[in-house]
Structures are given as C-alpha cells and as structure tokens.
Amino acid sequence: MRQKEDIEKYFKQFFTYWIPDNIIEFGTGDGEFTAILRKLGMFNIYSFDIQEGNIETPGVDYYKMDIFKYEKDIVDIFKLDNLLLLCDDGDKIKEVGTFAKYLKPGDVIMAHDYADDRESFIRFKYWRTCELTFTDVQDDLKEFKPFHHDLMIQAGWMSYMKQ
C-alpha cells in the first residue's frame, strides 16, 4: 500500500467530523487503501485506475479507464450527494484541475502526496513524497476552503471543501 502505515487512523478520525455518502477514488492501486475505506463506512465507492487489476472488494465499483479520456462519461457520478473525491493516481495536479469543477458546495476534495509548499515538506516530512503543493492547485481551489486540512496533511493528504 502506498499510504502512511497508520492511514486508517487519519481517515477514521476525519469521518467522525464528516461522513460522505459517496467516494470517488482516482488511483485504486493494489486496492488495499480502498478496502480500508470500505471498512470505515458504508459509503458507495467508485474507484478508477488506468492499470489492469484483479481487485474485488464488496461494495466497490471498479473501473479500468483513463479518467481524462473518458471525463464526460464519469461526470454523472459527481451529481451524487455528499461526495468525497480522492485524487491519488498518476497526475494529481491534473486530476484536481480537471475534476474539482464538478464538485458541489459541501463536497470535499483530497489529493495524496501533498504538502502546502516545498519548505513545509522538507521541514515536517509527514510523508515520503511530494507531488503537489497548494501553488499547483490554488486556481482550481478558489471556491474551496481548507476542511480538516491540519489533520489530513499529517498523512500527506490535502483536504478542501467546496463552498
């Protein structure tokens, strides 16, 4: 799994503050993180990955596809209530930039391998890699505000709610 060892703890605490009805996950990987999400709640999970995988978790709808190529085919999922979008595939900056606009007020977007800036990443080293910073996505998040961001950044995740 490509998450912090204690990632379940962070998402469990996050879900005490806010519980989504639906989760869209970009980047299924080996499915271990998806299984943790499934364990933590009874939300509908829609997981997308461009890589071939043989992952089966009850209650999770898996899609092997290029989300950018089929953007218009998946946007109906964004109409569902109380949505959490998890960006953790191969191009997180592009994922945020492409799909944040489909979120509704009250929906939450997160992106993994995040630090507020490079200096913070070096100083706090919450997570081993930094693939995006706030500067990379600030234009895409103009209608968003930090949402339990101080908790989730400790696990290398950005967290913002659409206003």
Image (cartoon, helix red, strand yellow):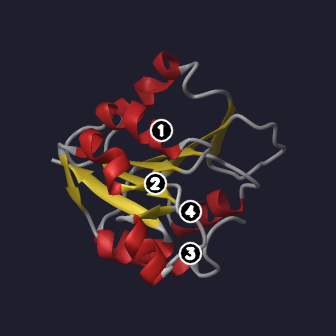
Q: For the N terminus, which image quadrant?
A: bottom right
Q: In percent of the image, x 62 and y 43: which residue is there?
A: 90
Q: State how far apart marks 4 and 2 are (Cα).
A: 23 Å
The mark nearer the N terminus, 4 or 3, is 3
The mark nearer the N terminus, 4 or 2, is 4
Pinpoint residue 139: horizontal percent, then vertical percent. Answer: 25, 40
- Which picture quadrant has residue 151? bottom left
Q: Which mark is residue 37?
A: 4
Of discs 1 and 3, which sits in the foreground? 1
- Which picture quadrant has residue 62? top right
Q: In percent of the image, x 57 and y 28: which residue is there?
A: 67
Q: State how far apart marks 2 and 1 are (Cα).
A: 11 Å
Residue holding disc 3: 7
Residue holding disc 1: 95
SS class of the residue under badge 3? helix
The mark nearer the N terminus, 2 or 1, is 1
The mark nearer the N terminus, 1 or 3, is 3
Residue holding disc 2: 132
